[in-house]
């Protein structure tokens, strides 16, 4: 039945099914927005100060670094890979950037941040080369480089830390100042999200990432340069982690070698909550960024509602599990709907 | 198969190199009974958890929540002890709770068809979170010496620490289960071709579920060992240990795609990592070097088969 070409006699049913699938895709992002509302509104009723501009700004500011990393991770996960090294890349980039600024007090802001980005790019290229050319699973490669990058970070830091006093004011201002009331870090994150979203939506190579993730073999046969694209996604993920590291310095001021330890799991959680399938082929950066915002918001709400901090992690975990469960159930529904509509078209 | 054997031979060879280097560079104290005792203590929990995790990975799944189950089990021991329970009742309870944690993972993976990587990242946070809920940031340390001495004294008349005795017994059981039973054959079958396994009548879901339950139960046992070894029940015991265990298993030659690997290789992998760590500590090398070495070993272990394959195919292609 399914091996036959679908005849053109029932185009309306097919488009109906396709429309359903797009709608479910949209519902996924809408679902996160609804979840955000469900979290924010009760908190705001209990404590109206929660929705004052200042606390909303803090909310966005706290989520922006994880959201950035989630964008890079989305590109990687869409191609059916994973980058577990992002926390370590962020840590390495953050420390090296801070040290660079501290050692060379006259460094222009852009150059210093560019240095951090370059560190991240180098790490990402290494990951990408190992995965694409070494032909080894990315989970293992990036688990290995998670250790290596963090180890290099500690070895270079030698137990020292860079304090805000040694950093240029321009950098620290970047972490705290605002344009039109919106923190600059948030704007940077939004720009990166928009660029990545447009790329994935409207560019040929962006669409090819989905093709690779849906079916790597078919993608190869269709002439897509799988190795090259894979290398690029890891390079971009590293680059973004490098940028996030530099911004981490701007935001927190004091940096030691432990910056961003364990962040990789938060990022993967945000991506999964945001509806990016862990086995590749579907998902959007907007969803992933919203996932990061949702996780960050929940943490803040728990603080505002004076729920003991000890509950936060358990709730975050339960949320992640329910997100993937709901996702799965929706996907099963959708598959069923698609099957029935195709089945009737043959009748 | 030949590739696999080669990797295990390489591991044993590396082990001998580490042992000899250690012996020479430390003037013979590396292989002394006292040092081996500490080496054994150091790798106890990793060796324990690596056993069921090997089976899970051979079956083509992964469990990243094991270290959190260890933490939850440790926190529960402290909480129940504070509540006045006797250790004779606490320990079985904790193991059952660990098995339940594993069953939750297994049910989500087998019944809902969710990817185990995503599920166990979720339960990694959930179980660690529950540990924090149970015990907060307090530590419970007033356990009777008769129990904590298990973690600090060797088996009478030898230099073998008790956790290693436990790991050895379990290793034999798991070894027989994986390599000499129909259950083990079905684990390999599932890992190499799940659909094929289902069509040949293997109850795939049931086998996978039992593997997750085993992983949970053994992780809880590791939690008991950890708690008594440091004589301290804390919610954050063993944070991040999951990556070390996964690294050891993969270093032992188990394929992350499932279907390949042996328990012997994994034990060699655990020993190699532990031995290197111990050697570097004896030589006052900083721990960061150790982190780098762990990562590099892991990378080499996955790159080596791929490189040999490539060289092999090149040789075949040459006239």
Image (cartoon, coloured by chain):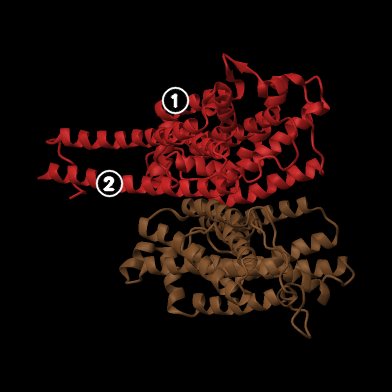
Chain colours: A red, B brown
Q: Nearer the viewer, residue A173 or B291?
A: A173
Q: Which residue is mark 1?
A: A198
Residue situated in front as seen by the camera: A231 or B247: B247
Q: Label 1 neighbourhood size at 10 Å, few (<14), some (14-19), many (20+)?
A: few
The residue wearing badge 2 is A333
Q: Residue at x 18, y 46 (%)?
A: A340
Image coordinates of residue B242 in percent, x first then y, are: 60, 57
Kindly report the distance in space between the C-alpha atoms of the residues bearing marks 1 and 2.
29 Å
- Count every numbered label the image shows and give the total: 2
Q: Residue furthest left?
A: A347
Q: Quadrant of residue A125?
A: top right
- Circle 1 — which element? helix
Q: Residue at x 48, y 58 (%)?
A: B257
Horizontal and vertical percent for residue B191? 44, 64
Work out whether residue B259 can be spotted.
Answer: no
User: Which comes before the other along the chain, label 1 or label 2?
Assistant: 1
Question: How many residues crowd around disc 2 within 10 Å: few (fewer than 14), some, or many (20 or more)?
Answer: few
């Amino acid at each position: 039945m399914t091996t036959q070409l679908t005849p053109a006699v029932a185009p309306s049913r097919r488009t109906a099914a396709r429309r359903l699938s797009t709608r479910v895709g949209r519902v996924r992002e809408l679902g996160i927005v609804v979840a955000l509302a469900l979290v924010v509104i009760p908190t705001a009723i209990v404590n109206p100060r929660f929705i004052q501009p200042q606390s909303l700004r803090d909310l966005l500011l706290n989520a922006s670094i994880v959201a950035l990393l989630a964008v890079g991770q989305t590109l990687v996960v869409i191609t059916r890979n994973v980058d577990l090294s992002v926390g370590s890349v962020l840590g390495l980039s953050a420390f090296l950037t801070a040290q660079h600024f501290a050692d060379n007090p006259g460094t222009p802001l852009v150059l210093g941040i560019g240095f951090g980005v370059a560190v991240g790019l180098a790490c990402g290229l290494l990951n990408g080369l190992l995965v694409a050319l070494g032909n080894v699973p990315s989970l293992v490669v990036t688990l290995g480089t998670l250790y290596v990058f963090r180890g290099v970070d500690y070895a270079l830091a030698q137990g020292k830390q860079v304090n805000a006093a040694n950093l240029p004011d321009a950098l620290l201002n970047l972490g705290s100042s605002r344009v039109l009331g919106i923190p600059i870090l948030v704007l940077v994150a939004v720009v990166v999200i928009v660029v990545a979203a447009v790329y994935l939506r409207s560019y040929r190579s962006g669409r090819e990432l989905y093709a690779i993730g849906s079916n790597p073999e078919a993608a190869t046969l269709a002439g897509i340069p799988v190795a090259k694209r894979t290398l690029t996604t890891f390079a971009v993920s590293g680059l973004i982690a490098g940028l996030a590291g530099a911004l981490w310095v701007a935001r927190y001021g004091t940096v030691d070698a432990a910056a961003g330890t364990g962040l990789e799991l938060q990022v993967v959680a945000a991506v999964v909550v945001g509806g990016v399938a862990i086995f590749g082929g579907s998902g959007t950066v907007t969803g992933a960024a919203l996932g990061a915002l949702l996780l960050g918001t929940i943490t803040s709400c728990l603080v505002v509602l004076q729920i003991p901090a000890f509950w936060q992690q358990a709730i975050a975990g339960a949320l992640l599990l329910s997100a993937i469960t709901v996702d799965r159930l929706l996907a099963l529904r959708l598959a069923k709907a698609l099957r029935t509509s195709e089945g009737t078209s043959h009748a | 198969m030949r590739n696999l054997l080669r990797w295990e031979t390489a591991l044993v060879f590396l082990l001998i190199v580490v042992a000899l280097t250690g012996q020479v560079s430390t003037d013979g104290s590396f292989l002394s009974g006292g040092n081996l005792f500490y080496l054994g203590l150091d790798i106890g929990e990793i060796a324990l958890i690596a056993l069921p995790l090997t089976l899970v990975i051979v079956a083509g799944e992964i469990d990243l929540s094991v270290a959190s189950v260890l933490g939850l089990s440790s926190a529960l021991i402290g909480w129940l002890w504070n509540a006045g329970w006797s250790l004779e009742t606490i320990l079985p309870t904790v193991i059952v709770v660990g098995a339940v944690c594993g069953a939750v993972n297994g049910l989500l993976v087998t019944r809902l068809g969710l990817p185990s990587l995503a599920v166990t990242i979720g339960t990694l946070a959930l179980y660690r979170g529950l540990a924090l809920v149970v015990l907060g940031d307090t530590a419970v340390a007033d356990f009777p010496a008769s129990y904590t001495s298990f973690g600090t004294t060797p088996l009478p008349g030898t230099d073998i620490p008790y956790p290693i005795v436990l790991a050895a017994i379990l290793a034999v059981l798991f070894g027989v289960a994986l390599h000499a039973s129909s259950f083990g054959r079905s684990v390999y079958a599932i890992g190499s071709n799940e659909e094929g396994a289902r069509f040949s009548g293997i109850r795939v879901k049931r086998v996978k579920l039992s593997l997750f339950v085993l992983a949970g139960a053994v992780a809880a046992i590791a939690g008991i060992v950890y708690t008594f070894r440091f004589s301290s029940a804390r919610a954050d015991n063993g944070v991040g240990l999951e990556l070390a265990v996964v690294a050891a298993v993969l270093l032992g030659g188990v394929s992350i795609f499932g279907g390949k690997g042996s328990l012997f290789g994994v034990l060699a992998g655990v020993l190699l990592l532990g031995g290197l760590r111990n050697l570097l500590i004896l030589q006052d090398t900083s721990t960061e070097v150790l982190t780098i070495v762990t990562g590099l070993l892991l990378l080499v272990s996955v790159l080596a088969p791929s490189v040999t394959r490539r060289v092999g195919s090149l040789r075949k292609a040459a006239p």
